[in-house]
Image (cartoon, helix red, strand yellow):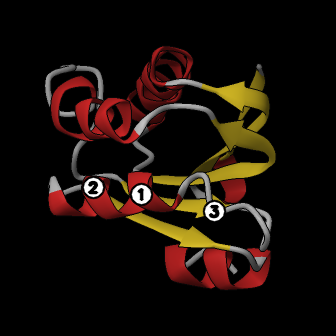
Amino acid sequence: MACTITPVIEKQYIYMKVTGEVDRHSAMINNIQAHRIGKELGIKKYLVDLTEARNTESISDNYQFAYNDMQGTPDIDRSAMVAILVSPEDHSHDFVETVSRNAGLNITLFSDRQLAERHLGIA
């Protein structure tokens, strides 16, 4: 898995591009790094591009990610707004959205970048 994190200062969001296989541990490393940058810059909106990434975790691990990893890590801004861009044919991230929203996180999946940007108010 590879990840680039880019602050887009003029539109006030963090852009993350992830490629390859994603598991909860690698996702947390990237999320912590992105949220630290967001906190330094006062940014609370994130556009996460997973169009070239596949979630390889089990249902149980996805549940642990949302309820334990994301909730129990002080560096994660639980008030952040996150739009996740996925390929239309990839449903490996669907359960993460459901369980994350149930855990109180503002995460929404999109297969259209324009809709994701509109959702974040950055279009």
Label of residue 91 in the image: 3
Q: Is residue 105 left or right of residue 97?
A: left
Residue 74 at x, y = what percent?
Answer: 18, 20
> Identity of the amino acid at label 2?
Val
Q: Quadrant of the N terminus?
A: top right
User: Which one is in front, 105 or 118?
Assistant: 105
Q: Is residue 121 left or right of residue 62?
A: right
Residue 120 at x, y = what percent?
Answer: 52, 73
Q: For the residue carrying disc 2, how many other residues have a C-alpha within 10 Å: few (<14), some (14-19), or many (20+)?
A: some
Q: For the residue carrying disc 1, how many other residues have a C-alpha within 10 Å: few (<14), some (14-19), or many (20+)?
A: some
> Helix, strand, or loop for circle 2?
helix
Look at 67% across and 85% down and name the residue there.
115
Q: Is residue 57 positioned above or below 121 on the image?
A: above
Residue under label 2, please give it: 99
Residue 110 at x, y = what percent?
Answer: 63, 74
Select label 3 or label 2 by which is in front: 3
Q: For the residue carrying disc 3, how many other residues have a C-alpha within 10 Å: few (<14), some (14-19), or many (20+)?
A: few
Q: Looking at the image, is mark 3 or mark 2 earlier in the sequence? A: 3
Q: Quadrant of the C terminus?
A: bottom right
> Identity of the amino acid at label 1?
Phe
Quadrant of the image occupied by residue 22: top right
CA distance separating discs 3 and 2: 14 Å
Q: Is residue 121 positioned above or below 46 on the image?
A: below
> Helix, strand, or loop for circle 3?
loop
State yes or no: discs 2 and 1 in contact (Cβ < 8 Å). yes
Residue under label 1, please give it: 95
> Helix, strand, or loop for circle 1?
helix
CA distance separating discs 2 and 1: 6 Å
> Identity of the amino acid at label 3?
His
